[in-house]
């Protein structure tokens, strides 16, 4: 009776490809079939294939996963966002669901899958749970009673060592807000990446217990049992008219419910009686919210922003010092220019006073004993030429002021006498 | 691990700031106050010179037209021609009996204009009972 089998159809999109799988659920576990891959340009074909599987197996659940990076684990409810309850008062919330109009009835978060995988191992010691999905690290710091913090870190394009450093930074960031380091780390890999594990072990010096499983298997596991699925699928808390995705999910649920009513009761752990309505799970479908204070705390508790902040803070005195230095350098230049003007003016004035004094002395020495024809008077030398009327008084007068001067006379044809005088001042 | 070096940049910036402070900023601040002191001293010195010559107005920048116009009120003939750059050839004529006008003009010249007589050199020539004085003026700034 293949058509009465309970089948989980799983799909997710990674980069430009849709990956599709289905598995027959049995009491002993699920039996996965061959995985199928579709390029995003073949979306219609992919949806047709999902519909075909639905028609082949009337009792199905279609499970998918949210690989968005904007999801976080919190302990508050937000009616305007979509959420999945992990346990007690911990919820995964994200702004919206985007399943791209692909048929989906159960939509899980990597955080819920991670918690389901490791919840049995949690105790009162702090455990860092890391899920490596689609080159992203979904990290949760958890104890048996609470999930304390969560981060999603993209690692695409990073080397294994750089990924390990990101994990280490997250641990340090968490230490800054809680003063606790994780006692041990559990890691769930959806890619087979032994090199990453090796590097993580080397860099973090901790015993990391890896589990490798494909996203399809994890989804088959999540959708394979009612208790797991009902408690942890992402539900929209938005009104039905508000989002078409919510409508899609609801419609899918209705059709699913109709098809599961007649399933026989012997498979008591499968999803034949799965109740996915909001009314049946009102108590558990608590919407979560991140308060403004939490957002601030997250912002300032983040290691990278803290590092940036301290770097920026270090630049404050640096910029202040550079500004002060620049100001005083410019001021100094202006002051030196002003001083140079004053100095040159004083120097010029001193020279001019000396020149005027020399000129006065020269004309005073000549007095009425001579008549000037031409002269060159400076602060370093004098050269005079003219007609002398009284040779001896002129010589004597000039010699008194300029004892080392060279005085000479030259009789002219018109019975007059020309004199010339040269001296250093 | 390279993560441990995340605090290195702020430390380096902080050390760089300290080095700049003591090697650059502190000497500049010190120079600033020394310059102010020197400037005040020079200014007082110049003010005393102004006081000595009983000149109230401060020296102005050289302007050919203004200089010529003001000089013409003192001398019988004034010629000013630009030579090159900041230099001007000035030719003044004064009655040979009023040669002291030249002295007082030269003596207070740089208190009226920001100029100096190049090489502090005057050329005199007697022309029909008139003394012609020639010199080159150089603008200070």
Image: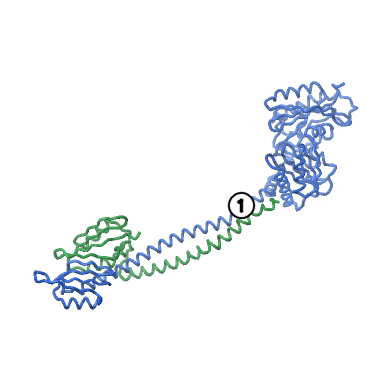
In the rendered image, what is the letter of the chain coloured blue?
A: A
Indicate whether A126 appears above or below A25.
below
Q: Which colour scheme is used?
A: by chain
Q: Is residue B123 left or right of residue A96?
A: left
Q: Quadrant of the N terminus of chain A?
A: top right
Categorize mark 1 by other alpha carbons within 10 Å: few (<14), some (14-19), many (20+).
some
Residue at screen point 66% across, 48% down? A305
- Residue A136 lies in quadrant: top right
Q: Residue A405 in the image: state x and y as whole percent.
A: 24, 74
Residue at 69%, 33% (x, y): give it: A15
Q: Position of residue B119 (x, y in %)?
A: 30, 64
**Residue nearest the observer in this picture, A196 or A56:** A196
Q: Is any part of residue A91 visible from this angle?
A: no
Disc 1 is placed on an element classified as: helix
Q: Which residue is drawn at 21% across and 65% down?
A: B124
Residue A358: tell me if it is visible: yes
Q: In which quarter of the image is the C terminus of chain A?
A: bottom left
Residue A416 falls left or right of residue A322: left
| Residue A365 position within the rendered picture, expressed as x and y whole percent measured from the top left | 20, 74
Camera-nearest residue between A329 and A84:
A329
Toward which corner of the image does residue B13 lie, by quadrant?
Answer: bottom right
- Where residue A333 appears, as percent x and y from the top left, is 44, 60
What is the chain letter for disc 1? A
Q: Using the image, determine if residue A258 lies above or below residue A135.
A: above
Q: Is residue A197 above or below residue A355?
A: above
Image: A199 above or below A423: above
Chain B tint in image: green
Occupied quadrant, residue A343: bottom left
Mark 1 sits on what residue?
Answer: A312
């Amino acid at each position: 009776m293949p058509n009465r089998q309970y089948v989980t159809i799983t799909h997710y999109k990674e980069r430009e490809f849709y990956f599709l799988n289905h598995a027959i659920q049995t009491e002993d576990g699920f039996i996965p079939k061959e995985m199928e891959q579709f390029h995003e340009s073949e979306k219609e074909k992919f949806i047709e294939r999902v519909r075909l599987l639905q028609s082949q197996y009337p009792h199905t659940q279609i499970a998918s996963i949210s690989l968005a990076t904007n999801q976080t684990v919190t302990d508050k409810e937000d009616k305007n966002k979509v959420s999945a309850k992990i346990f007690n008062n911990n919820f995964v919330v994200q702004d919206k669901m985007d399943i791209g109009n692909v048929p989906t009835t159960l939509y899980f978060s990597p955080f819920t899958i991670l918690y389901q995988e490791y919840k049995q191992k949690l105790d009162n010691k702090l455990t860092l749970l890391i899920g490596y999905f689609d080159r992203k690290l979904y990290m949760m710091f958890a104890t048996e009673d609470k999930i304390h913090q969560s981060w999603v870190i993209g690692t695409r394009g990073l080397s294994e060592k750089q990924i390990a450093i990101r994990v280490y930074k997250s641990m340090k960031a968490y230490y800054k807000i809680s003063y606790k380091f994780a006692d041990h780390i559990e890691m769930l890999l959806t890619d087979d990446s032994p090199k990453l594990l090796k590097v993580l072990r080397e860099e973090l010096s901790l015993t990391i217990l890896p589990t490798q499983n494909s996203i399809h298997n994890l989804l088959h596991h999540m959708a394979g049992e009612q208790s797991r699925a009902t408690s942890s699928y992402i539900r929209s808390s938005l009104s039905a008219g508000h989002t078409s995705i919510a409508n899609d999910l609801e419609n899918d649920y209705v059709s699913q419910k109709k098809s599961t009513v007649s399933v026989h009761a012997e498979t008591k752990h499968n999803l034949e009686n799965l109740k996915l309505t909001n009314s049946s799970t009102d108590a558990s479908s608590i919407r979560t919210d991140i308060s403004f204070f939490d957002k601030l705390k997250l912002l300032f508790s983040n290691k990278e922003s803290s590092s940036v902040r301290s770097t920026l803070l270090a630049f404050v005195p640096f910029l202040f010092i550079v500004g002060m230095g620049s100001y005083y350098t410019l001021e100094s230049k202006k002051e030196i220019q002003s001083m140079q003007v004053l100095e040159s003016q004083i120097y010029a004035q001193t020279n001019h006073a000396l020149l005027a004094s020399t000129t006065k002395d020269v004309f005073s020495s000549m007095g009425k004993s001579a008549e000037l024809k031409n002269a060159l008077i400076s602060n370093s030398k004098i050269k005079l030429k003219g007609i002398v009327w009284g040779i001896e008084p002129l010589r004597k007068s000039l010699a008194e002021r300029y004892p080392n001067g060279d005085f000479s006379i030259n009789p002219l044809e018109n019975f007059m006498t020309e004199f010339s005088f040269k001296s250093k001042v | 691990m390279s993560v441990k070096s995340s605090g290195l940049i702020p430390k380096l910036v902080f050390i760089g700031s300290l080095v700049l402070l003591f090697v650059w900023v502190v000497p500049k601040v010190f120079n600033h106050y020394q310059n102010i002191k020197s400037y005040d001293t020079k200014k007082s010195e110049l003010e005393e010179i102004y006081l000595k010559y009983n000149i109230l107005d401060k020296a102005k920048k050289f302007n050919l037209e203004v200089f010529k116009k003001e000089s013409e009120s003192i001398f019988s003939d004034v010629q000013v021609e630009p030579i090159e750059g900041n230099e001007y050839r000035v030719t003044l004529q004064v009655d040979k009996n009023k040669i002291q006008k030249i002295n007082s003009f030269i003596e207070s010249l740089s208190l009226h204009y920001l100029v100096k007589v190049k090489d502090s050199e005057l050329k005199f020539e007697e022309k029909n009972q008139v003394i012609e004085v020639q010199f080159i003026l150089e603008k200070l700034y």
